[in-house]
Image: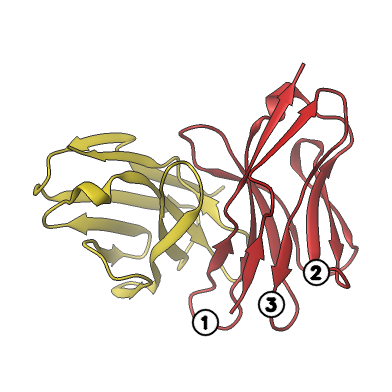
Chain colours: A red, B yellow
């Protein structure tokens, strides 16, 4: 079965500093990986995805993610954090075994950016 | 462009009452549709998905049901709500080669 793990419940970073939100995956076959962000009482917003190609994927709002096959990781990064980046971040993987083209989500990481 | 509508945004219902949450998608045809529940503001649990009209797959046994009467309409229902049905419900759509797009969610509180 496909799965993703987000080892950190919360990440704190000062505004202007680089941020990293970690995600590792377990899949059979080639992984299709996604990052989403959720603001309070809102739906999830898509940030970026890795399907194939360059290991460094660039997405919305200045975020990027690095796909590392040997470490089975897909960490989300941003060079300079903003207070407005504070939100809940989810990593997800597409289920390639079952039907329905489903996404399996991690447990989420709360990012807090402080002045 | 594609949009997804989910309503109501918030709902307070007594235990034992029925439930109907509706989700509609515009701008795409034959999408896969999904209902997720998010408890305590954290992880998402997939409840149901549908790959076509009238086709419903349940991921977990529960007090809820889903229906897809039209291509771009997905409904989550219950005949009698339980306290444990409280949560944040999210509808989403996806095609084979796209990411998933989510509605704005429904906050359900069963009292």
Depth check: give the residue in front, A70 or A64: A70
**Mark 3 sits on what residue?**
A27
Camera sees residue B97 = no
Q: Quadrant of residue A13?
A: top right
Depth check: give the residue in front, B104 or A76: A76
Count the labels in the image.
3
What quarter of the picture does the C terminus of chain A occupy?
Answer: top right
| Disc with the residue nearer the chain's start (2 vs 3) | 3
Measure the C-alpha gap from mark 2 to mark 3: 9 Å
Depth check: give the residue in front, A56 or A89: A89
Circle 2 or circle 1, nearest the eye: 2
Residue under the image location 66 percent in, 61 percent down: A5
Q: Is residue A78 left or right of residue A48?
A: right
Q: Is residue B94 left or right of residue B111?
A: right
Q: Secondary structure at mark 2?
A: loop
Measure the C-alpha gap from mark 3 to mark 1: 12 Å
Where is B46 relative to A76, above or below?
A: below
**Mark 2 sits on what residue?**
A72
Please provide percent x and percent y for residue A75: 80, 53
Please provide percent x and percent y for residue B101: 54, 52
Please provide percent x and percent y for residue B63: 21, 62
Measure the C-alpha gap from mark 2 to mark 1: 21 Å
Residue under the image location 57 percent in, 47 percent down: B1
Residue under the image location 60 percent in, 57 percent down: A106
Mark 2 belongs to chain: A
**Mark 1 sits on what residue?**
A98
């Amino acid at each position: 079965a496909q799965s993703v793990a987000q080892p950190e419940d919360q990440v704190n970073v000062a505004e202007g500093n680089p941020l990293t939100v970690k995600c590792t995956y377990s899949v059979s076959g080639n992984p299709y990986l996604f990052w989403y962000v959720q603001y309070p009482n809102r739906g999830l917003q898509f940030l970026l995805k890795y399907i194939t190609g360059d290991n460094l994927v660039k997405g919305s709002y200045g975020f990027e993610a690095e796909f590392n096959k040997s470490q089975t990781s897909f960490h989300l990064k941003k060079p300079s954090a903003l207070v407005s980046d504070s939100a809940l971040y989810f990593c997800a993987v597409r289920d390639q075994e079952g039907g329905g083209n489903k996404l399996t989500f991690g447990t989420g990481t709360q990012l807090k950016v402080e002045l | 462009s594609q949009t997804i509508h989910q309503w109501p945004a918030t709902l307070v219902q007594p235990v034992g009452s029925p439930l109907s949450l509706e989700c509609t998608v515009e701008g795409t045809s034959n999408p896969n549709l999904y209902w997720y529940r998010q408890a305590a503001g954290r992880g998402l649990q997939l409840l149901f998905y549908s790959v076509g009209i009238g086709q419903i797959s349940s991921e977990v046994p529960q007090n809820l049901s889903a229906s897809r009467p039209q291509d771009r309409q997905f409904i989550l229902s219950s005949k009698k709500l339980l306290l444990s049905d409280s949560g944040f419900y999210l509808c989403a759509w996806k095609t084979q080669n796209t990411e998933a797009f989510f509605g704005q969610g429904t906050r359900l509180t069963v009292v």
